[in-house]
Amino acid sequence: TESKCRIHGGNLKTRSTELGSAVTGSPLTTVLPASSTVKKSIVLSSESRKKRAKQAKVTKEERRAQIDGRHRYLISRLADGIDLSEQQVEETIISDDKFHLIEQFFAPSGLKKLLFFYQDVSQQKSNASLRPDESTNNLPQKKLFITTGSTEDFTGTCAFFLRTSDGVITASNVSQEVNFGMFDCNNGNILQGLEFFLSQIMIPALKSQQNWGAVKEGLKNSQIQQFLYAVDKFVGTLSSTRQNIEDKIQLTKVDIDIYVRNLQNPSDYITAG
């Protein structure tokens, strides 16, 4: 019976233990009840979340300590353009996984652009974090976040910063070296947003520009005039493309039966053609 015991080299083993060792090839590991395993998993999961939250808090404070006049300039422009408080923008930035892109933008010969999207995002809550009265559905929430522009769909507002030179961006030159702009793409209509931005903001600004750098003649220069003409033409093409996509041009449906019903020989086909 399983209650019988044998002595092997001074070790006391039951037959059930021998069977476990024979099956596994190693001393039998105690099998915990399922409820104990689940409880242990929940405890480990809770500890893991606490550890991640603690690390995230440390990271945020380290980033907050890095904020200087350059970051303050970006934050103030974003707050003005998106109608958020500067504190809200700061908290968003230092919590963003792509915070490093800001430093790359400030660096000598760094990124030429820095993009922010402000739009609805779906935040899926995990079942473990839900209270009994909460739903597991995707919860749409408007959010500001840093983006490369190639990994997320653009459905809201884009705020962008463009640098005008390859030099290092400092607190003293950031307002001269960095340009800020926004364009709107609500309901996913990117072409309309881009068309409005170019036609209503950029082109009027360019046509009123007095200083064209090394070009002394300014707007009278033939190359400047050709450039402005090309931009105007591009906006016109953009507008036509948008209208075509929106089904502004519709082809009339034709009942061809009346043309092909009585076709009998090749001459009839030629006539129909």
Image: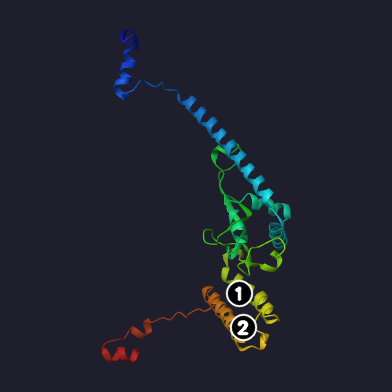
Which sits earlier in the primary sequence, circle 1 or circle 2? 1
From the image, tell me which residue sits under label 2.
228
The answer for how far apart the CA atoms under marks 1 and 2 are is 15 Å
* Mark 2: few/some/many CA within 10 Å (<14, 14-19, 20+): some
Residue 148 higher or lower than 22, as above or below: below
Q: Residue at x 61, y 83 (%)?
A: 228
Residue 168 higher or lower than 245, as above or below: above
**In this image, 147 relative to 23: left or right?**
right
Amino acid type, label 1? Glu
From the image, tell me which residue sits under label 1.
195
Q: Residue at x 55, y 80 (%)?
A: 237
- Return the residue nearer the eye: 142 or 25: 25
Q: Determine whether label 1 and label 2 are within 8 Å by CB.
A: no
Residue 47: x, y in percent? 57, 33
Amino acid type, label 2? Leu
Residue 183 higher or lower than 50, as above or below: below
Dot 1 falls on a residue whose secondary structure is helix
Quarter of the view holding residue 179:
bottom right
Residue 105: x, y in percent? 60, 61
Dot 2 falls on a residue whose secondary structure is helix
From the image, state whether disc 1 or disc 2 is nearer to you.
2
Quarter holding the N terminus is top left
